[in-house]
Image: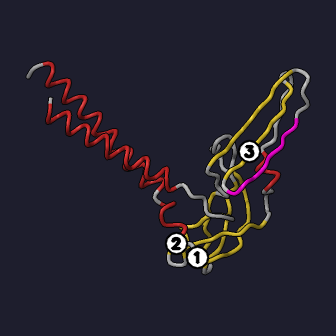
Amino acid sequence: MSEIEIIKIIFGVFLTLGGILLIFLAFKFLYKYLIQEKRCTSKTEGVIKRYSFVSNGGLHLPIVYYEVDGKEYKVKGPEYKWIIEKTVSTPFNENKIDYKENNQNITINRSMNSFAGISKDPIREMYPINSKIDVFYDPNNPKLAYVLRYCNMKSFFWMMLISGIVILIIDILILICL
């Protein structure tokens, strides 16, 4: 086996793994956005009990608990398609935060003191603990749900899926043509 063939095999294996990983991640984390809009037709009221440990674009989203047919479920949200954050930090600024929620986007403007800059998470002000919020769920599968409004992130699913498929096609072409 020549060095070129060994390099092609190793490169091919990594491309294959990368393509398969992208396809797997698309279905694992983003497929729900394709089906939520049509299936989540029932509405109930949920309670915000805590916030996510992992930040989503710098925000810790609420974890909402809701009950369907005597069984408790939880969902993270409301989700945002885009989180736009602008921070100005100088030694003479006051620590203040302004935020504006616009449909599926949130814009956060922070003004911070560079010596002692402390900033609150605006989500905790908008959605305090123990507050009630609307949850839309699938009556056939109550675990499939979203909070307050549907967040259209179908394009992210399609981008990730198509990228994985293109990587696999490139891998096959490289193995065949070279």
Marks 1 and 2 sit apart, C-alpha to C-alpha, by 7 Å
Q: Amino acid at mark 1?
A: Thr
x then y, percent, for residue 125:
82, 51
In the shown orientation, is residue 155 left or right of residue 113? left
9, above or below 148, in the image: above
x then y, percent, for residue 144:
54, 67
Where's the N terminus, which quadrant?
top left
- Check disc 3 and report its element: helix, strand or loop: strand
Q: Amino acid at mark 3?
A: Thr
In the shown orientation, is residue 135 left or right of residue 138? right
Q: Are marks 1 and 2 in contact (CB under 8 Å)?
A: yes
Is residue 102 part of the magenta span, yes or no?
Answer: yes
Stretch in magenta: 96-103
Magenta-drawn stretch, dominant element (helix, strand or loop): strand
Residue drawn at the location 71% of the way across and 73% of the way down: 45
Q: How many marks?
A: 3
96, above or below 69, in the image: above
- Check disc 1 and report its element: helix, strand or loop: loop
Marks 1 and 3 sit apart, C-alpha to C-alpha, by 29 Å
53, above or below 30, in the image: above
Q: Which residue is mark 2?
A: 38
149, above or below 140, in the image: above
Where's the C terminus, which quadrant?
top left
Q: Which residue is mark 3?
A: 107
